Image (cartoon, rainbow, N blue to C red):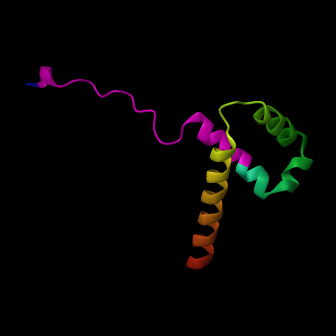
Amino acid sequence: MQDDLKPLERHAGYYTAPWRKARICARLFLHPELLARERYKRIAAAFVHDPSVTNRLISQAVAQLQGIRCQRDAAS
């Protein structure tokens, strides 16, 4: 009976690499003061040329982060 079970396929998960990159871009968009740091300038410059980070993904990430902030403010 145990031999009939297939091993679980590895699930990529919700947080794919482009989504993580889009969330980083969204944080930089919502907090432009971070771009004063050299590290964040390099990250932003790298993501500008990354084809997997689309404007749509970034706008969805911005909406998600704003929604999380709104929910946090409403709860307190």
Q: Residue furthest top?
A: 3
| Residue 53 x, y percent position in the rendering | 67, 37
Depth check: give the residue in front, 32 or 54: 54
**Displayed quadrant of residue 33:** bottom right
Q: How many marks?
A: 0
Q: Is residue 17 left or right of residue 44?
A: left
**Displayed quadrant of residue 24:** top right
| Residue 49 x, y percent position in the rendering | 78, 30
The correct choice, above or below, for 64 with respect to 38 in the image is below
In the rendered image, which quarter contains the N terminus? Answer: top left
**Displayed quadrant of residue 72:** bottom right
> Does 21 lie within the magenta span?
yes
Q: What residue is shown at x 65% (from left), y 32% (from top)?
A: 52
In the rendered image, which quarter contains the C terminus? Answer: bottom right
| Residue 36 x, y percent position in the rendering | 92, 49
Q: Is residue 7 left or right of residue 12?
A: left
| Residue 65 x, y percent position in the rendering | 64, 59
Q: What residue is shown at x 63% (from left), y 75% (from top)?
A: 73
Depth check: give the residue in front, 45 or 1: 45
Q: Residue furthest left?
A: 1
> Does 5 lie within the magenta span?
yes
The correct choice, above or below, for 19 with respect to 32 in the image is above
The correct choice, above or below, for 63 with respect to 11 in the image is below
Bounds of the magenta span?
2-25
